[in-house]
């Protein structure tokens, strides 16, 4: 079974993207082993810091994963700073980081109608810059996401079925 690292872009406990990530992990539990990165534990990026235990743990998680699934909201038309910070930590050395050739899948979530489609494009652009292997296919964008969470669980069956099909195709393409 492939080992997949879920990287959420929201830190809040009641986050719709975190709920969506949990639902995806549950739904695909027979096809992949999922773990979740804690991007909130990382310090702010500082190139002078060369030996931080949280950074080392995150970089090792990315490096050791067979694939990465990002599930992130859009903040001000782009990627949340906390997610970009995590990516920056794991992006060195340039063009030879743990992201190089790493299979990556992007899902975006929004409280509004556009489903974070701008953050989706920005994140894919960022990943391309690190020479990651970004999954191409139908884009998983989750609109009106907060309304699809009931008692902490993401509960929109159509969205989950659509995402399941795309992520299954991503898993099938792993080395
Ligand atoms: C700082 C901030 C910026 C936001 N900017 C956008 C945006 O550009 N586009 C959008 O669709 N929603 C935006 N939102 C609304 C989020 O989509 C909404 O809060 C969503 O629930 C956040 O994801 P989460 O539930 O995983 O925390 C923003 C929210 C915050 C807190």
Image: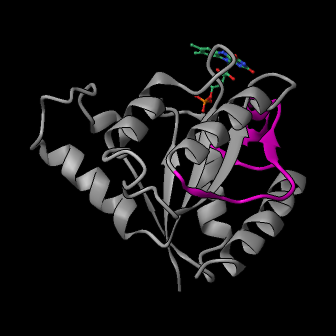
Residue 99 lies, with reference to residue 115, above or below; the image says below
The magenta segment is: 131-156
Rendering coords of residue 88 (x, y %)? 38, 36
- Which quadrant of the render holds ligand 1? top right
Residue depicted at 61% across the width and 67% down the height: 26
Residue depicted at 32% across the width and 45% down the height: 92
Is residue 145 inside the magenta stretch?
Answer: yes
Residue depicted at 71% across the width and 69% down the height: 170
Rendering coords of residue 120 (x, y %)? 71, 37
Rendering coords of residue 51 (x, y %)? 9, 44
Q: Answer left or right for 127 relative to 58.
A: right
Q: Answer left or right for 87 relative to 148.
A: left
From this viewpoint, is residue 120 visible?
yes
Q: Answer left or right for 129 relative to 58.
A: right
| Front residue (pair 80, 143) | 80
Residue 52 lies, with reference to residue 78, above or below; the image says below
| Front residue (pair 12, 56) | 56
From this viewpoint, is residue 18 visible?
no
Is residue 152 inside the magenta stretch?
Answer: yes
Outermost residue on the bottom side: it is 1
Rendering coords of residue 19 (x, y %)? 61, 45
Residue 7 lies, with reference to residue 136, above or below; the image says above
Outermost residue on the left side: it is 51
Outermost residue on the top side: it is 76
């Amino acid at each position: 079974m492939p080992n997949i690292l879920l990287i959420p872009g929201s830190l809040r406990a009641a986050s719709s993207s975190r709920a969506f990530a949990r639902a995806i992990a549950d739904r695909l539990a027979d096809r992949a082993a999922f773990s979740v990165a804690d991007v909130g534990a990382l310090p702010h990026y500082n190139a002078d810091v060369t030996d931080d235990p949280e950074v080392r743990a995150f970089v090792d998680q990315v490096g050791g994963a067979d694939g990465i699934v990002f599930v992130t909201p859009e903040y001000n038309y782009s990627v949340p700073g906390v997610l970009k910070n995590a990516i920056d930590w794991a992006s060195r050395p340039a063009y030879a980081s743990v992201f190089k050739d790493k299979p990556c899948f992007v899902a975006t979530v929004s409280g509004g109608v556009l489903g974070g489609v701008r953050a989706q494009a920005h994140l894919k652009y960022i990943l391309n810059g690190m020479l990651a292997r970004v999954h191409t296919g139908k884009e998983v964008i989750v609109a009106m996401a907060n309304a699809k969470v009931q008692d902490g669980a993401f509960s929109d069956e159509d969205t989950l079925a659509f995402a399941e099909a795309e992520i299954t195709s991503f898993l099938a393409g792993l080395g």
